[in-house]
Amino acid sequence: MPEPVEIGILGDYDSASPTLPAVEESIQHAADKLKISAKAQWLPTDSLLDLELEKKLGAFDAVWAGPGSPYKSFDGMLRGIEFARRRDWPFVGT
């Protein structure tokens, strides 16, 4: 079986949110429809200020800017988005 598509979700996950759990569910729904395997991982916005950002995000096949503004780190979110845009990385923003 092929390796799963790995998607990094930029955002500050809160299990009590009525919408944030749906992000991972939508990824799984799309993967099921496409008959592929997908794995999603939330990346807190303050972790995107890390000097190793390129290495961290480069490990993912795609990046999703999750909902949830205001973010803990608006600058971190912008750095994650900039990473995807400057490298023409697969990117979705909600």
Image (tube, rainbow, N blue to C red):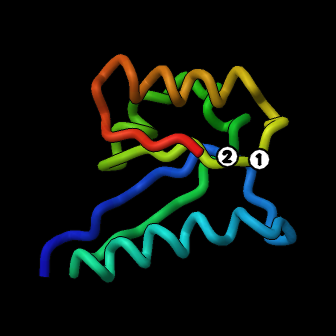
Q: Nearer the viewer, residue 62 or 54?
A: 62
How far across and how far down the image is residue 33, in percent?
A: 29, 80
Report which quarter residue 25 is drawn in.
bottom right
Image quarter of the C terminus = top right
**Total residue callouts:** 2
Q: Mark 1 and 2 residues: CB-CB less than 8 Å, in contact?
A: yes
Front of the two marks 1 and 2:
1
How far across and how far down the image is residue 60, in percent?
A: 36, 48
How far across and how far down the image is residue 47, in percent?
A: 66, 37
| Residue drawn where x is 54% and y is 51% of the image | 9
| Residue drawn where x is 64% and y is 30% of the image | 77
Identify the mark at residue 57; answer none if there is no mark: none
Say whether residue 17 is left or right of residue 47.
right
Q: Nearer the viewer, residue 56 or 19?
A: 19
Element at label 2:
loop
| Residue drawn where x is 32% and y is 40% of the image | 90
Give above or below for 21 relative to 41: below
| Residue drawn where x is 50% and y is 70% of the image | 26
Give above or below for 4 relative to 33: above
Give above or below for 73 relative to 36: above
Q: Which residue is mark 1?
A: 68
Mark 2 surroundings within 10 Å by alpha-carbon count, few (fewer than 14), some (14 through 19), many (20 or more)? many
Element at label 1:
loop
Mark 1 to mark 2: distance in Å? 7 Å
Say whether residue 18 is left or right of residue 39.
right
Q: Amino acid at mark 2?
A: Gly
Q: Which residue is mark 2?
A: 11
Report which quarter residue 48 is drawn in.
top right
Q: Amino acid at mark 1?
A: Gly
Pointer 1 or 2: first along the chain: 2
How far across and how far down the image is residue 46, in percent?
A: 73, 35
